[in-house]
Image (spheres, grey):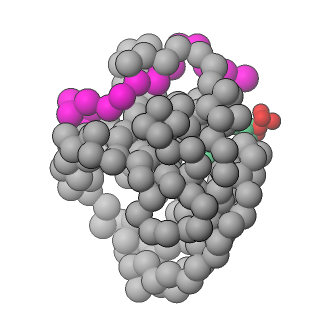
Amino acid sequence: MTNPTVAIRKARAADAPGMARVHVQSWRSTYPGLIPDSFLVGLSEPASAARWRSVVETQGSGQSALVAVDAAGAVVGIAAFGTRRGAIDGYDGEFYALYLLEEAKGLGIGRRLMAAMAERLLAAGLRSAFVWCLRDNPSRWFYERLGGVRVAERPIRFAGAPLVEIAYGWRDLAPLARLSAGPEVG
Ligand SMILES: CC(C)(COP(=O)(O)OP(=O)(O)OC[C@H]1O[C@@H](n2cnc3c(N)ncnc32)[C@H](O)[C@@H]1OP(=O)(O)O)[C@@H](O)C(=O)NCCC(=O)NCCS
């Protein structure tokens, strides 16, 4: 199911507070039990907004961000992507982040954001991409549903905790880009 009242567009500096709200709320609903509580408690919307403002203001230099906005103009989903930050053989691009508010899940918005990112990576000349996801995050099945293939695994330390991440890859972004449905603006 898609939600036609939600539009996807390039993020703007004025979106930073809304992006931070989605980021913090999504982390607090997704990661309890996966990453240390102290880290989730310590998340700050103003600090997150400052980081998102800086991401948005440096768009174009190999990285970019999108927002999903509802009919009232509120940000309900965020996505960031660009050139890969670390090497995985055969992959050029990377999906850095994808987060939705709890109430925006299950409406096809995640699929549309992935398609919109794939479209823009292709337009920038990047034909493939991967995403890193915590192995214990149940949202990773979403990437499998969208055709991502497990291409790497790595142990990391995050906020002092030992964790495992899995990378899902798309060797050809064209089929993912074609999944787009609903209004894409700008
Ligand atoms: C992962 C996320 C972006 C998916 O967005 P969404 O809008 O809820 O997903 P969609 O409605 O577009 O679903 C697309 C398909 O994936 C499936 N899917 C979505 N989440 C799934 C899950 N957790 N497990 C299995 N399948 C899932 C849907 O059923 C749908 O399948 P269909 O093609 O049969 O209809 C969203 O759930 C989210 O924000 N999760 C929390 C944050 C997070 O973990 N982000 C990833 C960090 S690496």
Q: Residue at x 59, y 67 (%)?
A: 89
Which image quadrant shows ligand 1? top right
Using the rendered image of the protein, determine whether residue 101 is visible from the camera's viewpoint.
no
Q: Residue at x 50, y 81 (%)?
A: 156
Q: Residue at x 45, y 28 (%)?
A: 68
Residue 154 position, x and y percent, is 58, 79
Instruction: Tell whether position 150 is magenta.
Output: no
Residue 153 position, x and y percent, is 64, 75
Residue 10 position, x and y percent, is 36, 28
Q: Is residue 36 left or right of residue 90?
A: left
Q: Is residue 6 left or right of residue 13?
A: right
Instruction: Tell whether position 4 is magenta.
Output: yes
Q: Which residues are magenta?
A: 1-16
Image quarter in which the C terminus is found: top left
Q: Nearer the viewer, residue 132 or 33?
A: 132
Residue 42 position, x and y percent, is 30, 67
- Would you place residue 3 above or below residue 170 in this image? above
